[in-house]
Image: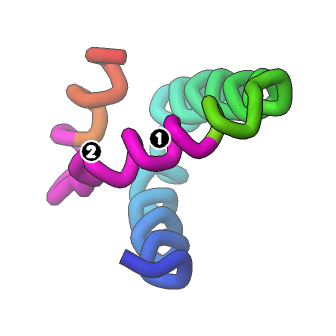
Amino acid sequence: MTATQLNAEILRNMSIIAEDENLLKRVAKYLRKLVAEKDNSALLTKEDFFARIEKAKKQPGKSFSNVDELERYINSL
């Protein structure tokens, strides 16, 4: 999936989430965790950084067909 496709998927999902304040709060909390992880990635060696990328490439992506499915996923984190 390309970056453009990922952005479109995220924006579609966010348009659904934007209608629910509780979901927005949970997404904001999760995004803060992601940003903190990104900040910590600067502390990795070059080899470790690229090893993480290769590992991530092998993992399947996530998509959700409805808000309830997304909510269950976020709750599981």
Mark 1 or 2 closer to N-term?
A: 1
Q: Is residue 35 left or right of residue 73?
A: right
Which segment did they paint magenta? 50-69
Q: Which residue is mark 1?
A: 20
Foreground of the two, 49 or 76:
49
Majority secondary structure in the magenta region: helix
Q: Secondary structure at mark 2?
A: loop
Query: Which residue is pictured at 54% across the width and 76% down the height?
Result: 3
Q: Could one spot residue 68 in this view of the protein?
A: yes
Q: Dot 2, crowdedness within 10 Å: few (<14), some or many (≥20)?
A: few
Furthest residue in direction front, as rendered: 47
Query: Which residue is pictured at 43% across the width and 48% down the height?
Result: 54
Residue 46 locus on image (x, y percent): 74, 38
Q: CA distance from mark 1 to mark 2?
A: 29 Å
Q: Could one spot residue 62 in this view of the protein?
A: no
Quarter occupied by the N terminus: bottom left
Residue 59 locus on image (x, y percent): 26, 44
Foreground of the two, 75 or 4:
4
Is 75 located above or below residue 25 in the figure?
above
Is 9 located above or below residue 66 in the figure?
below
Q: Which amino acid is tagged 1?
A: Asp
Q: How many marks?
A: 2
Q: Which amino acid is tagged 2?
A: Gln
Residue 63 locus on image (x, y percent): 25, 56
Q: Dot 1, crowdedness within 10 Å: few (<14), some or many (≥20)?
A: few
Q: How is the image coloured?
A: rainbow
Foreground of the two, 40 or 21:
40
Q: Secondary structure at mark 1?
A: loop
Q: Identify the mark at residue 59; answer none if there is no mark.
A: 2
- Whether the magenta-drawn stretch holds residue 52 is answered as yes
